[in-house]
Image (cartoon, rainbow, N blue to C red):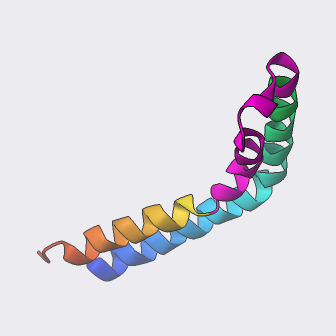
C-alpha cells in the first residue's frame, strides 16, 4: 500500500476515534464521577492529594490518545521504505 493511502486511512481512523469519543464522552464522564464518589465513600480520598482531580480528568485526557497514537503511527508510515 502506498504511503498516501496509508496516511489517508490513518486520518480516517483518527477522525472515527474522535467521533466515537465525542459520542461516548458524556457516558465516560458520568462513570468517572460515580467511581470518584464511590471511592470517596469507601476510602477517605482526602488522604491522597490530587487523586480525585486526576480521576475526574481521565475522560478529558482521552482526547489526547488518538492524536498521540496517530502521530507515532504517522512517523512509522513515513519512515517505512517504499516498495
Query: Is 72 on the left or on the right of 46, as rendered?
Result: left
Number of labels in the image equals: 0
Residue 50, given in percent of the width and then of the height, sits at 72, 44
Residue 46, given in percent of the width and then of the height, sits at 80, 32
Residue, x 70% and y 46% (percent of image)?
54
Main structural element of the magenta stretch: helix, strand or loop? helix
Residue 1 visible in this rendered orientation of the protein? no
Nearest the eye: 4 or 36? 36
Residue, x 44% and y 61% (percent of image)?
69
Q: On the rendered image, what quadrant is the N terminus found in?
A: bottom left
Residue 79 visible in this rendered orientation of the protein? yes
- Residue 77: which quarter of the image? bottom left
Check if residue 49 falls in the magenta segment: yes
**Magenta-colored span:** 40-63
Query: Is 67 on the left or on the right of 55, as rendered?
Result: left
- Residue 81: which quarter of the image? bottom left
Q: Is residue 64 above or below residue 80?
A: above
Q: Is residue 14 above or below residue 48?
A: below
Residue 8, given in percent of the width and then of the height, sits at 43, 77
Amino acid at each position: 500500500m502506498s504511503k498516501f493511502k496509508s496516511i489517508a486511512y490513518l486520518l480516517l481512523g483518527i477522525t472515527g476515534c474522535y467521533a466515537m469519543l465525542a459520542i461516548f464522552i458524556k457516558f465516560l464522564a458520568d462513570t468517572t464521577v460515580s467511581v470518584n464518589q464511590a471511592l470517596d465513600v469507601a476510602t477517605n480520598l482526602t488522604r491522597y492529594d490530587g487523586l480525585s482531580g486526576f480521576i475526574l480528568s481521565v475522560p478529558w485526557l482521552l482526547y489526547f490518545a488518538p492524536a498521540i497514537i496517530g502521530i507515532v503511527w504517522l512517523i512509522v508510515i513515513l519512515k517505512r521504505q517504499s516498495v
